[in-house]
Amino acid sequence: MDALTFAVQLLNGVQYGLVLFLVASGLTLVFGILGVINLAHGAFYMLGAYLAWAIAAYTGSFALAVAGALAISFVLGILLEEVFVKRMIGRDHLAQVLLSFGLILVIDEVRQIVFGKDVHSVAPPDWLRGSIQLTDVLSYPIYRLALCVACLILACVIFYVIQKTRLGMVVRAGAENRDMTRALGIPFDLVNRYVFAGGIALAALGGALVAPVSTVFPGMGDSMLILSFVVVVLGGIGSVAGAAIGALLIGLTDTFGKVFFPQFSSILVYVLMAGVLLWRPNGLLGKS
Amino acid sequence: MTRSTGTKAALALIVALAVALPFVAPGYYVQFASKAMLMAMLALSLNLVVGYGGMVSLCHAAFFGLAGYLLGLMTPEAAGASVWIALPAAMLGVAVVAAIIGALSLRTRGIYFIMVTLAFGEMLFYLFHDTRIGGGSDGLYIYFKPEFVLGGITLIDLENPRAFYWVALAWLVGAAVLVQAMVRSPFGHALAAARDNERRALSLGFPVFRVRLTAFVVSAMIAAVAGFFSAAQFGFVAPQMLGWHLSASILVMVVLGGMNSVLGPVVGAIALLGLEEVLKSNFEHWKLIKGLIVIALVFALPGGLKQLSAMMFPPSAAKEPAPANPKEAASHV
């Protein structure tokens, strides 16, 4: 493998890792703050992609599609928090697993009723079409570069909000000690609601942004969900920085695994996770 | 622990129904009942880990499917595999895998355990999905049912649905008796003690890790028997048999029937499969209804159908001790 091919694969791995981070950060935040394990996270990723496809097909605008997927999923998140998730806080994990499993079935079927079960593709916006010619045989799609940049910006925004803003401070305090935060008069129910809705919106945003480079299909949330879980476990539950490290590790492992061991690339990711957990049972940046 | 007369009566009724069924029901229902009993066995095995051990495992479908694949890989092209060799081999294979997965997963607690078992289950899923072992994503046909042959004589012909039914029933009863004996033994009390208060169990000198691992492996071996015969029944194995959707469905069965009893998951499995069967034949979007039922179960009936029957028929004075609070169990794992 020459240096240029290697660089392209590296870029692919980083880009994949960044998307994974976007999706997994929502999952880890929801768990860290609400203490709720959400297996339906992948379903919202899938939903985001379908919403983006539907809106793009209707309006012809990719920007509107992404914004629409984000807004709709956020509102959906607020509704779900109000109706279901609120009642799950503090209940045992088994109940949470079952609730989110039920939600997956419901979301999947509703998606099938509304959007059907066909496979779709979404066109990137005109100005991001085409690819950069690197050599005679090697080119890189511009949209993938843009996706990289967009995810990087979003990752910075997430970090900024969590590390530097008052909202982020409340969120971090909540992840650290729920009862103490509540005792200090933080309107925690409100924080929970927006964290849940925000987490889901991040998953849907990931799905919408990925739609032009992957196809939009019913089972797309499944593999993303499991990989997000691997990322969260690797990084340490509730740790956004851990999720970032985990996501990049998984993105690179998966991409280079596909290059070097095509058949075993999916398994390689789990081997990595098992190895990390043997070394640190609570993840890389997890609290013991 | 004494059983109430109600439980005894229910048990007797179930056994009577199970024995009578192949004589009165049409072939389709006999096959459906066999399938339901194998799933009941799977739910029963999961309950040993979840209900009595407080370990929410999301990889039991992987043990189930792995045993099916092992049968498929051991079945010769021109004949059925010998049950005497294939079944112990499949159980042993699954036991080894479960021991490795269990030993690694049991280093973690609570939610990490859920996620780690989920990940290991998916690892096995992708092993069969992505590589050419067992036909990749297309799966594997098992053209011949395993043979119960001794000294050249076929003892049981699994091709006959009614014979298959008796085999499935016998295994289910055997598994129920085994689990019942386990949970009533000192081993079972140690397992429950570790679930209710790990620290105290440790300080009392229970080998918590070893007890949990044993329960995990035994449970996986029961799941393996269920998977072995399920694969034999359908003559086909596919990666989806190992997927986490099935693991989650079995969890639903366990909770639906009620944890902390050996019969609960059996009732839950039969109830859920029966319900699915009815929904499938009446509604195109039956999964939507299944999802809503699962959600309703979480909110309205966290104790499962047992809770429902308790509401309809207020319990008498002679009653089993109250089941341990799962919330309490979860906070200690």
Image (cartoon, grey):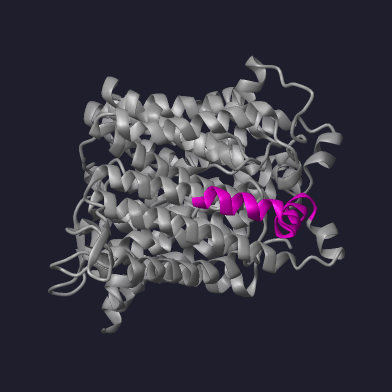
A199 or A265: nearer the viewer? A265
In the picture shown, does residue A110 fall above or below A178?
Answer: above
Q: Is residue A227 above or below residue A167?
A: below
Front position in the image: A133 or B145: B145
The structure residue drawn at horizontal position 63% and vertical position 30%, both measured from the top left corner, is: B7
Q: What is the x, y in percent for residue B28?
A: 24, 33
Left or right of A167: which side holds B167? left
Q: Where, by quadrant of the figure, is residue B145 drawn?
A: bottom left
Residue A149 is at least partly visible in this image: no
User: In this orientation, does residue A262 appear?
Assistant: yes
Task: Inspect the magenta stretch and tell me whether residue B116 lies in it.
Answer: no
In the rendered image, the vertical position of residue A273 relative to residue A184, given as above or below:
below
Task: Please name the residue shown 49% across and 68% down the image.
Answer: B95
How far across and down, in percent of the image, does residue B111 sit? 63, 52
Say which quarter of the image contains residue B322: top right
Closer to the camera, A144 or A199?
A: A199
Residue positioned 84% across, 67% down in the render: B205
Image side of residue A273 versus residue A193, left or right: left
**Magenta span dominant secondary structure:** helix
Q: Residue at x 70, y 43 (%)?
A: A171
State the extent of the magenta-drawn residues as a range.
Answer: B174-197
Task: Check residue B181 for magenta coloring.
Answer: yes
With respect to residue A274, does B319 lie above or below?
above
Q: Quadrant of residue B275?
A: top left
Q: Could you tell me residue A55's position as x and y percent?
A: 29, 29
Q: Where's the N terminus of chain A, which quadrant? A: bottom left
Q: Residue furthest bottom?
A: A2
* Number of numbered discs on residues: 0
Nearer to the camera, A197 or B271: B271
